[in-house]
Image (tube, grey):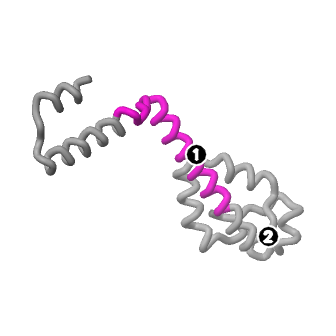
Amino acid sequence: MLLRFIDWLNRLPRRLELALRQELADLEEQIKMSYVTSWERFAREEGREEGEQRGEAKALLRLLQVKFGPMPPDIESRVQTAEPAQLDVWLTRILTAAFQNPETSVQEARGGSCWSPRF
């Protein structure tokens, strides 16, 4: 309704008419966009952080497996439940990680309680 009234009152030069149409199209597009509530933004951010944490844990477990062989369930659990700051520390240290007892072979260490990478 408003546009018809404006059009009736004022005939614009072609260049301005095209500019007005573009402005109106932009405004329509803005109105169509749904509002994202603060709760939705928070949930998205939390989901993104959780995804990053899972990805870092998965990467660390893969690096540990390549370096030391299959991981015992307790190590996997510790990595999967670690806080992001701890994962960052471990990801940095994996390059120089070693067994607590360097004389213990991987096979012996898997079966005993001494198996624990220092990281």
Mark 1 residue crowding within 10 angstroms, few (<14) / some (14–19) / many (20+): few
Horizontal and vertical percent position of residue 74? 78, 51
Query: Could you say which is closer to the camera, residue 102 or residue 3?
Result: 3
Task: Give the side of residue 117 with respect to residue 96, left or right.
Answer: right
Residue at image location 68% in from the left, 71% down from the top:
98
The disc label shown at residue 50, or none: 1
Label 1 – label 2 distance at C-alpha: 26 Å
Magenta span includes 41: yes
Which quadrant is home to the N terminus? top left
Q: Are marks 1 and 2 in contact (CB under 8 Å)?
A: no
Q: Amino acid at mark 2?
A: Gly
Give the residue number, with chain letter if any, for mark 2.
69
Query: Could you say which is closer to the camera, residue 42 or residue 92?
Result: 42
Give the extent of the magenta segment: 31-60
**Quarter holding residue 63:** bottom right
Query: Could you say which is closer to the camera, residue 11 or residue 117?
Result: 11
